[in-house]
Amino acid sequence: MRSVLSASTFLFFIASAQGQWLNYPTKDAPRTKDGKPDMSAPAPRTKDGKVDITGIWLANGLKYLINIAADLKPDEVPFQPWAAALYKERRENRGRDDPNNFCLPSGTPEKEAVTSPFKVMQFPGEMLILYESRTIYREIFTDGRTIPKDFRPSWQGFSAGHWDGDDFVVETTGLNGKIWMDTNGHPLSEAAHVTERFRRHDYGHMDIQITIDDPKAYTKPWTITENPSLMADTELLESVCEENNKDARHIVGK
Amino acid sequence: MIVAAMLASSLAPKAAMAQGKPDLSGVWSPDEVLSIRAKANALLLNRKAAASKRDPDANCTLSGVPRLDLGPKSFKILQSPDEVVILYQDFTTFRQVFTDGRPLPQDPQPAWLGYSVGKWDGDTLVVDTIGFNDLTWLDNAGTPHSESLHVTERFHRRDKGHLDIQITIDDPKTFSHSFTVTEHARLSPNVDLTEFICLENRK
């Protein structure tokens, strides 16, 4: 089936104008003879021998932003009946109620599929992701802490990360149930447990394997894999959705 | 400030980074909501222009600098050799302060939070920020500024539990000369920032 871009998809193209450090050379980037970043050089490693996943990354196109299940056959998404009906309704009304239309945040796991760069940084006790889209951040704790008892469900949820060999594995719960996982409208309930495995193959390429375990919305866990690329020699821009959201009133759906 | 009320541990020596620079990392909570209006008013070149308009934060844009520093919400500092990141509870937004020696941009596209570079002056992190738009307030009291604003924040961790931020406002189009205020914040050791989505709280 041919994908139809929902109106909200275009919101992600609202870009800030020229930024300032967009051509600033990335420190320690491996270079080819012509001085360009060597995207197929080996993945860097941190001092403790783990794969270093830090850097600025960007989804390869709109594919998973439009449809997180783009690589699956339609009947391979194990919807619960109500979730299937809701998905159908959202498709039919062309994503009229997508939270992104109203400048609400993308939730986990949509954020990494947005076609704006995100920057992964590593600190003692946490991995940090800075998102250009919405100029928002996500903390992934690596100090062994677990979700606080009084955690208020949120768009990004509570994320804890650990290393499994060369994979950085992030477990997220505490999601608010309002999340659309893509602009097509795959729902995610507050019962969801999302596992993301960040696997950097080489300097320029990473897979993020995402497993959705959400017994309320889906009959069994299901897994997809996204494939962002590194953006070297640049920096994030500031992006403020509410600064110029002229679209919402035009996104009337159907 | 009531020193006696502070935890003894918060008076312990400050931590140091591997490079010997002070470690500013932690969640910090401003002691009070600081208004710079009193100092600013006396220096305003055009008092009429400063008549309070609608709070830009009500539009759920990105607040501003130094307004985000001034409380009441907490902020978290994370520090790497090349960059200091400030995560703000307010707006769940952040600033990147580059400490890798890059220069400030020339004639940058105006931004809500500007462009920041930092350097160490002894034990003090000196952050210079320019490239602002003129849509933000300097503080909650509505103190205005122009695109010529240059903010200098001097972050000094006095001891483990206390951070002083000396903030100098230099904006020759708005104020007759620069002026300085000092924000005091204390470490909140067992606190995490929580997601704050402005739109969900806009009434």
Image (cartoon, coloured by chain):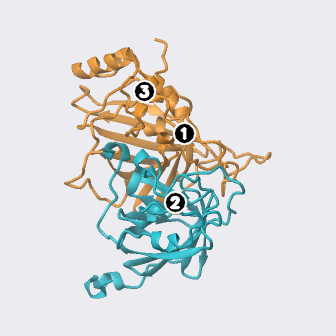
Task: Give B144 or A78, whichever is nearer the viewer.
Answer: B144
The single residue placed furthest to the top in the displayed view is A1
Residue B152 shown left or right of residue A160 in the figure? right
From the image, tell me which residue sits under label 2. Answer: B50
The single residue placed furthest to the right in the displayed view is A34
Image coordinates for residue A172, horizontal then vertical, percent: 32, 45
Crowd around label 3: few <14 · some 14–19 · many ≥20 (10 Å):
many
Mark positioned earlier in the residue sequence (3 or 1): 1
Task: Say if A2 sits above or below B200 in the image.
Answer: above
Q: Which chain does the numbered disc 2 sit on?
A: B
Whole-number angstrom distance, CA of label 2 to CA of label 3: 43 Å
Q: Are marks 3 and 1 in contact (CB under 8 Å)?
A: no
Instruction: Identify which amino acid the numbered label 1 is placed on.
Output: Ser
Q: Give the structural element (helix, strand or loop) at label 2.
A: helix
Quadrant showing the C terminus of chain B = top left
Crowd around label 1: few <14 · some 14–19 · many ≥20 (10 Å):
many
Tell me the residue at 44%/79% (across/down): B15
Q: Give the structural element (helix, strand or loop) at label 1.
A: loop
Residue B57 shown left or right of residue A173 in the figure? right
On residue A116, the disc is: 1
Q: Which chain does the numbered disc 3 sit on?
A: A
Whole-number angstrom distance, CA of label 2 to CA of label 1: 36 Å
Which chain is tinted orange?
A: A
Whole-number angstrom distance, CA of label 3 to CA of label 1: 15 Å
From the image, tell me which residue sits under label 3. Answer: A183
Same chain for mark 3 and mark 1? The answer is yes
Tell me the residue at 39%/47% (across/down): A169
Task: Give B40 or A214, whichever is nearer the viewer.
Answer: B40
